[in-house]
Amino acid sequence: MDFKNKFYYMLAPIEDMTDSCFRTLCYRYGADLTLIELIRFESLAKNNKSSWERIKLYDDTPTLIQIIGEREQFLKKFLSKLSPEKGFLGFNLNLGCPAPNFVNKGVGCAMVKRISKTKKLIGIIKDYGYGTSIKMRLGLNQYEKEKKTYLNLIKGVNADFFIVHARHGNQTYNEKADWSIFPECVKTGKNIIANGDIETKEDIKKIKSFGCKGVMIGRAAIINPLIFAELKGLSTPSIDKIKAEYGRLLKERNPPFRYQKNIFKHLRSNVEFKEI
């Protein structure tokens, strides 16, 4: 990725929504990079059929496989089985999910403070020759945020870029993302992608002023998948055309019904849902 000469627009992974059909749609209309929904690499290592189906790629849409876990032997086992498909650009290690079933196991946003473990996992992925990035929150709670745990992680880990969701793990989406942390993240010298409450051209201008290398958008994209094109100043079709195009992709790829149900429910709506 050319962070010196390009500002990137990325689609965030959202559970039961951002399947290959929706990722392709967003890529056609302005997204530069997409992420597959969060998946346990332990499940992939154990050849779980549904897990492998989720990481299948259908076209050349630039895609990262987002993974979560901590046991190095399972990561190695999965990577030894992988045959990259067209569109695959590498892996994203999740250090942002606040779900109790992950946090209680010391992963997700509970792993922001586990620098040594994170370095080992990133190192394993790099040893297999794949690109690596991290999606993270500002720590598990307000205390970890105040202690700048996130900065220690960014400074201590050699990932290609860091997607920083500007909330800690105990915050809800009703609380405004804290963009004031982005300048200090940029000062580490690492490639920083801003995430959290980014919706307008004015937001993009502000994020660029911090020195970030791109933005990641999730919830706003589900409501309006044309947001990437709009933020780039590109011409856009009607939302009805987008719905029809998405429908054709669904027929071609036949994902589980919950995806189309959730997407059609949220298009141009304000229903609450969660990024991962």
Image: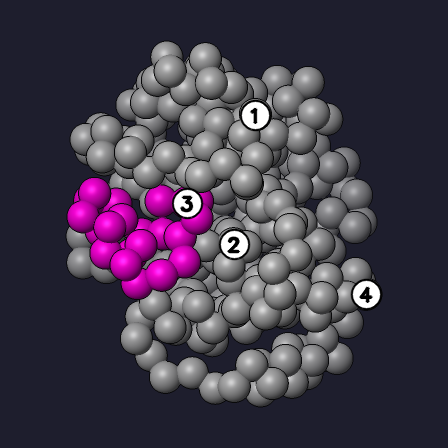
* Label 1: element kind: loop
Closer to the observer: label 2 or label 4?
Answer: 2
Q: Where is residue 74 in the image (x, y as percent from the top left)?
A: 66, 28
The residue that mark 1 highlights is 170
Q: Position of residue 33 (x, y in %)?
A: 43, 59
The residue that mark 4 highlights is 257
At a point 37% along the width and 15% down the height, the residue shown is: 146
Within 10 Å of disc 3 (Cα), the crowding (few <14, some 14-19, many 20+) is many
Closer to the observer: label 1 or label 3?
Answer: 1
The residue that mark 3 highlights is 195
The residues bearing labels 2 and 4 have C-alpha atoms spaced at a distance of: 20 Å
Residue 52 lies, with reference to residue 107, above or below; the image says: below
At a point 55% along the width and 40% down the height, the residue shown is: 174
Res 20 visible: no
At a point 59% along the width and 70% down the height, the residue shown is: 268
Q: Where is residue 173 in the image (x, y as percent from the top left)?
A: 55, 41
Amino acid type, mark 3:
Asn
The residues bearing labels 1 and 2 have C-alpha atoms spaced at a distance of: 19 Å
The residue that mark 2 highlights is 218
The residues bearing labels 3 and 4 have C-alpha atoms spaced at a distance of: 28 Å
